[in-house]
Amino acid sequence: MRVVIVTESFPPDVNGVAHTALQTARHLVRRGHAPLVVAPAVPVTAAGDPDAAAPCPVVRVPSLPLPGYPQVRVALPSRRVSHAIAAHRADLVHLAGPFVLGVRGMNAAARLGLPAVAVYQTDLAGYARTYVGGGESAAWRRLRAVHGAADRTLAPSTAAARDLEAHGIGRVRIWRRGVDTARFRPELRDAALRRELAPGGETLFGYVGRLAPEKRVDLLAAVCGLPGVRVVVVGDGPSEPGLRAALPGAVFLGRRTGDELARIFASLDVFAHTGPYETFCQTVQEAMASGVPVVAPAAGGPLDLVAHRRTGLLVPPEDADALRQAVASLAAAPTLRAAYGRAGRAAVEQRTWEAVGDELIGHYLEVLRERTAVAA
């Protein structure tokens, strides 16, 4: 099968859309298929070709940094999308988090008579509310245009699927994300790293992710005042300067990836995610795979991932006091933390990228069969 993955983001970007697109391309290659990735161009750095380690060919489309958030690139109008799909002789187009580049990919697929599978990954209406104080209706109109034209929309969680259907988007199926259970595992817990981060033996409470307004990392300020607790923040983004001032005593480690990130995850005592707009929340899965209990908002993707009082605690979204109380209760209960961590690891052990990738290929094949049946 020849598949073109049109994605709004791709490595070296570090985010959920980029990571899922990379894992999808890798799995397709492993299964003997022929993927091609179309993604926004990224700045040239001393590191050289950003796609040298990509599992398949990558076509880059001219892009500009998003104003106020230069880590996010927005593709410019370009004929490369249509040309790339046609030249690859694609059987199917995969639209990853479609919004700007994905709309062009959808239009190209329609002109070429190709089926398209659209993967919903980002709560764009929530982002519009956060960044511009409105614009949710416009965001949903945009989403309806591209997802409504796709043969199938894949949502990462039941909450996301309900949201899509409530806004008039049909043909929705659930396709969850995988987690690298070989990389993220409890055995990587590092005593030396723990002594470095918490020299007084404090309970390590960590956040991993982008430092941006919609993530509400500022809620961790309530946790910084807890006695015997040290807050660790991993990631970068436009909110970092303000968060450094707002979170006294917190340790900021910047962006970490790969095995180093896995070692940090496993060395935490509690993991927290604070953002209320997560359609899935991959870092929750990575924490669970690392044997770490999770505190997360009872909204969006975490509702599917965190079993309340079994693998962690769910708290009301954007409620700093509830977050503080949840952390305090776990900080005082090491036996309970260990039990939650074991249950979390057990819950994700079968959620490998291989298993999830095969589910995706199943969706592709169903869509191709449906197209064939309609044509017949």
Image (cartoon, rainbow, N blue to C red):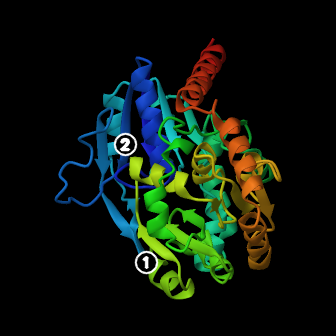
Q: Which residue is mark 1?
A: 68
> From the viewer's perspective, is 126 left or right of 22?
right
Q: Residue furthest top?
A: 376
Q: Position of residue 324 (x, y in %)?
A: 74, 75
Of residue 312 and residue 129, the one placed in the foreground of this image is 312
Q: Which residue is mark 2?
A: 38
Q: Residue at x 56, y 83 (%)?
A: 247
Q: Quadrant of residue 223?
A: bottom right
The answer to whether residue 15 shows anywhere in this view is: yes
Upstream in sequence: badge 1 or badge 2: 2
Q: Amino acid at mark 2?
A: Val
**Cα distance in 3D space between marks 1 and 2:** 24 Å
Badge 1: few (under 14), some or many (20 or more) residues near its Cα, within 10 Å?
few
Say which element carries label 2: strand
Q: Position of residue 31 (x, y in %)?
A: 44, 19
Q: Position of residue 108 (x, y in %)?
A: 44, 39
Q: Residue at x 57, y 25 (%)?
A: 364
Q: Amino acid at mark 1?
A: Gly
Q: Position of residue 143 (x, y in %)?
A: 62, 53
Image position of 42 with respect to 245: above or below:
above
> From the viewer's perspective, is 356 left or right of 43?
right
Counting every numbered tag in the picture gives 2
Image position of 318 with respect to 312: above or below:
below
